[in-house]
Image (cartoon, rainbow, N blue to C red):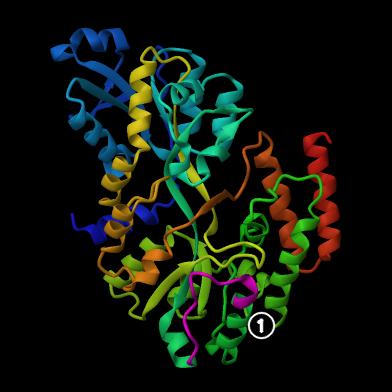
Amino acid sequence: MKLKRVLAMMLAAGMVCTSLTACGGSKTAETSAAGSTEKTETTKSDEKATSTGEKKVLSVTTWDYDTSPTFQTVVDAYMAKHPDVEINVIDTSADEYNNSLGISLSAAQPDPDVIWVKDMGSMLQMADKKQLLPLDDFMKKDNFDLSIYNGAAEQLQYNGATYGLPYRSDWYILYYNKDLFDAAGVPYPSNDMTWDEYNDLAAKLTSGEGSSKVYGGHNHTWQALVSNWAVQDGKHTVVEKDYSFLKPWYEQALALQDNGYIQDFSTLKTANIHYSSVFKNQQCAMMPMGSWFIATMIQSQASDETSFNWGIARIPHPADTEAGYTVGALTPVGISAYTDEPDLSWDFVKFATSEEAANILAEQGVFTGIQTEESLKTIASAQFFPEGDSNVEALTYTHYIFDRPLDPKITEIKTVLEEVHEMIMIKQYTVDQGIEELNKRVAEIKGW
């Protein structure tokens, strides 16, 4: 498969949700990495008895395994490196993953060994139920260096323990339309640009009226497109007792909207306008968006849906913060607390989250928790990826901040954040009223 096609398929998938069929005493969908999916009722002892060559057997959970190289690649690479290990893949469709995994783990049986985590909330639930094995003793024994993840691994720690390491990664960057910048005679965004400089560019790049208007920037309707920049410096999270730190960022978003430099929230929401159409139709010159959108644009160019020149830059940063800070989310991988192969499971997790695996996965267009020069060059070599060293540099970061922290109440809090965000952006709340509402409702959720 050509790299460009793989890159488009993988990154467009973004951080896909996942599912797993229950294992406890019932039939599970298990796939030998060397064979096809079939219904089985085997236990690990049965597998070991029938496994040829006295191979060690490891079971891992995945979703949509047959249609995605995200997991296949690292499973195959590990077995090639360890011919004495057979990996059984417990796979199911994405939308059933958390429910089925929860049922499986509630049976407290030795399969699965290794768990790819769907989202942070489910990881916290598993940790609270003591269904995940803390990795700290393994890391201490191996003198494992977490710095290779640029701060992301530390943010996965929960209640003082590490339950997963970064596997797949997505983060925010700035997309821009080179042709619109050229037409305006304005230099392209740099990889060291403040949000104030971004606002100035948005003003310069706004032109036209009505249906032919081109906006200098574009903010999608997500609450994260405001709060991300407020937590970008790592000093705050979206779970706080006092949300006054959000005020300047909401004032900035409202100013861009009031001046007509971005489309107004109400229009986007009412018309259900997707951010991809705004950028593809050249209705905006710049757009902060996740790294997964690279694949969307590559696919769009490959299919001749779009033909304009585009580029990427590091996400702008606060004035008092150096370039290289970004906001994103991870797909972690951890170990079941019930595994009967803890050492082998740890060895697999180490490999899956290593620099070696990062370079292998890059050939499939997968961004991982580790950035290496080799992996970035591999991804950037895809056809239709923007040309130029600055675009490759745009994929690098020095600090990786989670868009939301590891908090057991994060799902409830996120709902409140979205509701208040909408009220502020449509001006049913002033910024101060919105902050007061956040302080009150989050305090109720947290019991403060």
Image vertical order of residue 196 relative to residue 133, above or below: below
Give the residue type that dot 1 points to.
Gly
| Snapshot quadrant of residue 21 | top left
Badge 1 marks a residue whose secondary structure is: loop
Residue located farthest toward the front when viewing the structure as drawn: 143
Q: Residue at x 33, y 67 (%)?
A: 298
Q: Residue at x 29, y 59 (%)?
A: 377
The magenta-colored residue range is: 185-197
Image vertical order of residue 366 relative to residue 291, above or below: above
Residue 331: tell me if it is visible: yes
Query: Which residue carries the number 1 mark?
Result: 260
Q: Main secondary structure of the magenta part?
A: loop
Quadrant of the frame with the N terminus: bottom left
Q: In terms of depth relative to the viewer, which is nearer, 58 or 423? A: 58
Pointer 1: residues within 10 angstroms few (<14), some, or many (20+)?
A: some
Quadrant of the frame with the C terminus: top right
Q: Residue at x 66, y 54 (%)?
A: 231
Image coordinates for residue 413, horizontal then vertical, percent: 71, 44
Image vertical order of residue 313 relative to residue 110, above or below: below
Q: In terms of depth relative to the viewer, which is nearer, 428 or 323? A: 323
